[in-house]
Amino acid sequence: MPVRNRSKLPKLEALREEGTLNLTPDEVHDPKFQENEFFDPHDIVQVKYEMLRRVSVENASVSAATEEYGVSRPTYYQTKASFDKGGVAGLVPQKRGPRGPHKLRGQALAFVQQQLVAGEPVRARELAKLVRQKFGFNIHPRTIERAVAGKKLPDEQRQQQFAESSMVVAQYMPTITEQHHE
């Protein structure tokens, strides 16, 4: 669907930056989105909300609504569950990818923490090499810096958490090691 006028370009850019730009506005066939500028087929949150409203308030079938709004039935049910759980805020797409350090956890994180010297700067490149040697995987130095910066706990509490996480990881290490050697 082409942009109706140039004044919409800033809104489209804002939607793109916020991750709420509908990448398939041409798939939205609800007449409201064609006839009224208030309804913007580029705004995925508005599109999802109207789709849910259409089923809930206007008693449209899920099949008809998904066809009219250009989504699959599973997408409708995921959208409904997100809305039921979080309201309109639940319709905002979540950031993709891992949430937090997914490589640097458990024993590896405890190892990095043990290498730190109080009052000295973090030697992330050196630590990345040590992690590669000891655990056999690559970790970016910036990941180490972020993980260390995120741990603003008192030393005793930090040590206790790392000890607990190390014990949990240690329970699974023989299984993981066996799987790699098979």
Image (cartoon, rainbow, N blue to C red):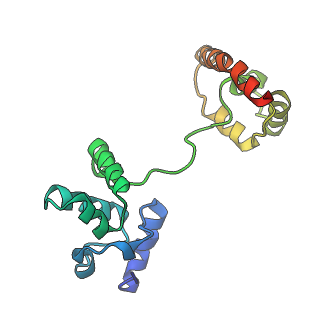
Can residue 41 be seen at all in this image of the molecule?
no
Q: Is residue 37 above or below residue 94?
A: below
Above-or-below relation of 61 to 121 = below
Q: What is the quadrant of residue 37 in the picture?
A: bottom left
Whole-percent x, y for residue 17 in the image: 48, 63
Q: Quadrant of residue 104?
A: top right
Which quadrant of the figure contains the C terminus? top right
The residue sitting at 65% across, 34% down in the picture is: 147
**The N terminus lies in quadrant:** bottom left
Residue furthest front in the image = 182
Q: Position of residue 87 (x, y in %)?
A: 27, 47
Q: Eyeballing the image, is 145 above or below 68?
A: above
The reply, left or right, for residue 173 in relation to residue 11 is right
Q: Position of residue 141 (x, y in %)?
A: 76, 41
Does the image show residue 130? yes
Q: Is residue 49 above or below residue 119?
A: below
Give me the residue at 20% from left, 60% from top.
61
Identity of the residue drawn at 66% across and 24% down: 106
**Extreme residue in the left direction:** 58
Position of 127 with respect to 66 (left or right) is right
- Residue projecting furthest to the bottom: 5
Q: Position of residue 148 (x, y in %)?
A: 67, 32
Q: Residue at x 47, y 66 (%)?
A: 16
Count of residue discs: 0
Q: Quadrant of residue 110?
A: top right
